[in-house]
Image: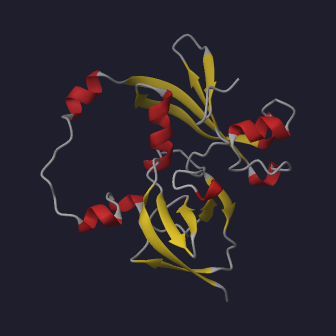
Amino acid sequence: MEKLVLLYVGRDSFSRPVFEAEGKLYVDVDPCEGWAPKICTKYGNNFDGEPDVAIREDVAMEFIPGRDLWDKGKSIRERQMPDTGETLPDDSVLEKKRHVMKVTLYQVIPERDNEHLLFASFCRVKQRCGGRVPAESYGVVYSGELNITTPEEAFVIFNAYHPEGHNGHSMSVSDVLEHTDSEGRSEFYSREQRAK
């Protein structure tokens, strides 16, 4: 059986654990306790690149010094560092700046992915589909209200904190986020740009 030894190097800008093996960077897409690792290469071998090619399920993996999981609260490196005593702002201060936003997250459904769009950049999705977003390839993986101020905060939530009712993978560039305002008007976003 083929084996991949993954050396932990840190977390990317979306708090996903990044590993290195034989000069290539890999990312754990859904690093949750009790979930099997879903390891992908990093697009362009860039530390903050998006997940690209998924590693086959029959490849054995060894994580050194261990697998970094979101459920553990801190990254491996943070757990190894001494506490600096710094504190986060009081929750009541943050809550005053927040309001509830109705959001719907659409992701490419693998069984409908005839164009190989999953984890492709949003620009590439539109290029492959004649300038449009192929709604027939997508499905709703979350619909609900989030206590946030901007759509950008939703991106963080869908990568690091997976709200109750979310049944997809961590948010990727091929995904589309719909924000519906109090008057029922919708705006659509991808991680790269406002979706058109």
Q: Could you tell me residue 6's position as x and y percent?
A: 51, 75
**Identity of the residue furthest to the left in this view:** 85
Quarter where residue 59 is shown: bottom right
Q: Could you tell me residue 151's position as x and y percent?
A: 50, 29
**Identity of the residue furthest to the front in this view:** 23
Q: Could you tell me residue 144's position as x and y percent?
A: 52, 33
The quarter of the rendered structure image containing the C terminus is top right
Please name whichever residue, 47 or 132, is drawn nearer the observer in this view of the structure: 47
- Residue 76 in the image: above or below residue 4: above
- Residue 92 in the image: above or below residue 106: above
**Identity of the residue furthest to the top in this view:** 183
- Residue 107 in the image: above or below residue 39: above
Please name whichever residue, 49 or 3, is drawn nearer the observer in this view of the structure: 49
Quarter where residue 27 is shown: bottom right
Residue drawn at point x = 62 percent, y = 26 percent: 194
Lateral position of residue 43 relative to residue 146, left or right: right
How many numbered marks are there? 0
Colouring style: secondary structure
Lateral position of residue 134 relative to residue 194, left or right: right
The quarter of the rendered structure image containing the N terminus is bottom right
Residue drawn at point x = 70 percent, y = 72 percent: 56
Lateral position of residue 84 relative to residue 131, left or right: left
Q: Could you tell me residue 70's position as x and y percent?
A: 40, 58
Please name whichever residue, 7 or 190, is drawn nearer the observer in this view of the structure: 7
- Residue 169 in the image: above or below residue 126: below
Lateral position of residue 45 relative to residue 155, left or right: right
Please name whichever residue, 193 or 165, is drawn nearer the observer in this view of the structure: 193
Residue drawn at point x = 76 percent, y = 47 percent: 117
Residue drawn at point x = 44 percent, y = 49 percent: 160
